[in-house]
Amino acid sequence: MNILLMLLPISLLLLGVAVAAFAWAVRKGQFDDLDTPALDILDDASEQKPPPAQPGQGDAG
């Protein structure tokens, strides 16, 4: 019975942390655009990567 006196406050504390984390994620805009990331993987167009830097270019010495 004594274990319930310890587990109840711990569970309420964890619940509070979970609610705070969810509220933080909503405020920071984590759930604003749920469709675009799922469709990005289906995009066949490959992105152009910049060419690798040549040695000696942009060096000051």
Image: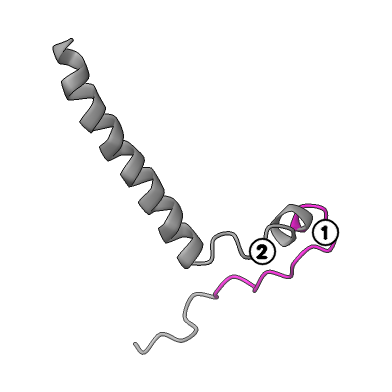
Residue at 32% across, 45% down = 17
* Three-letter code, disc 2: Asp
Q: Earlier in the sequence, mark 1 or mark 2?
A: 2
Residue 27 higher or lower than 13, as above or below: below
Residue 54 higher or lower than 11, as above or below: below
* Majority secondary structure of magenta residues: loop
Residue at 38% across, 44% down = 18
Q: Magenta region: which residues?
A: 40-53
| Outermost residue toward the bottom in this view | 60
- Whether label 1 touches label 2, CB < 8 Å: no
Quarter of the image where one finds residue 43:
bottom right
Q: Count residues near mark 2 (Cα–Cα under 10 Å), then give few for <14, some for 14-19, many for 20+.
A: few
Secondary structure beneath dot 2 equals loop
| Outermost residue toward the top in this view | 1
Secondary structure beneath dot 1 equals loop
Alpha carbon separation for disc pair 1 and 2: 17 Å
Which residue corresponds to mark 2? 33
Residue 55 higher or lower than 26, as above or below: below
| Outermost residue toward the right in this view | 44
Residue at 25% across, 27% down = 8
* Three-letter code, disc 1: Asp
Which residue corresponds to mark 1? 43
Display coloring: one colour
Residue 61 vs residue 36, the one in the foreground: 36
Which percent across, then down, holds residue 38?
74, 53
Residue 34 vs residue 27, the one in the foreground: 27
Q: Count residues near mark 1 (Cα–Cα under 10 Å), then give few for <14, some for 14-19, many for 20+.
A: few
Q: Is residue 2 magenta?
A: no
Pick the quarter of the image with the N terminus: top left
